[in-house]
Amino acid sequence: MPDARGFFIAFEGGEGAGKSTQERLLADALSGLGLTIVRTREPGGTPAGEAMRHVVLSPEFAGLDPRAEALLFAASRGEHVARVIRPALERGDIVICDRYLDSSVAYQGHGRDLGSQHVRDLSLWATRGLLPNLTVLLDIDPEVGLSRVSDPDRLEAEPLAYHQRVRDAFRVIAADEPERYLVLDATRSPEELAADILERVRLELDRAR
């Protein structure tokens, strides 16, 4: 469940969707309004999390067992929430995170066929049930998104069919809880996307007051 004091925004989507660009633009806009912003990413966000990020994303570890992969993502997320996200929310800050729990459900639950509920439950246990107040899903055709990637990591290098399953999973996840998601076409201009995201975030912040 979301924290009652701060506000938690996650950015999700396939490779090359522009998540990092949009979370940076949103952070800049909200900072300009005088709000305190914490920008972070997954996997990573802490020293231990960054070490686990290297294992799960580096081509050096090609062939990593899918269950081990899912456990590493959950472990990184649990540390991230405990050390960074939850403390920021308890201070009343706005946390903007590049990827969160839905990425595990899409990439490992669906992409690796480990079962979406198993993977979701694992991350909910690791994070003590913390979910974003709002998730922005930047939707993109995997073929288009992957064409934007110049130096693919271990997951980006997976076959196109894998990334299509991931995209399909994100869409299903968002459709199941439409009130908590903003789904946007990631092929639109960065400026148009940023404007729509800021409008929705300001609306949600007003509601949360």
Image (cartoon, rainbow, N blue to C red):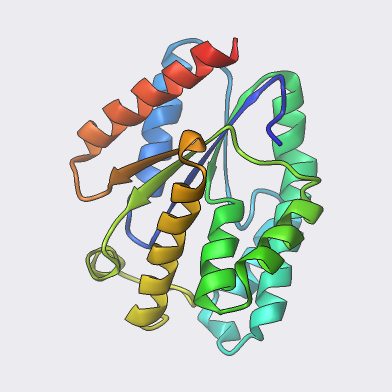
Q: Quadrant of residue 43?
A: bottom right
Image x and y of residue 80, in percent: 72, 48
User: In which quadrant is the C terminus drawn?
Assistant: top right
Q: Is residue 75 above or below residue 40?
A: below
Towards the viewer: 30 or 50:
30
Left-right relation of 20 to 187: right
Towards the viewer: 30 or 150:
30
Q: Looking at this rendering, what residue extends furthest in the front direction?
A: 176
Q: Is residue 185 above or below residue 91?
A: below
Towards the viewer: 180 or 74:
180
Q: Is residue 157 above or below residue 46?
A: below
Image x and y of residue 174, in percent: 46, 48
User: In which quadrant is the N terminus drawn?
Assistant: top right
Towards the viewer: 98 or 152:
98
Image x and y of residue 17, in percent: 33, 54
Residue 5 appears in the picture as rendered: yes
Q: Is residue 27 above or below residue 79?
A: above
Identify the residue at horizontal 72%, vertical 57% (top origin). 123
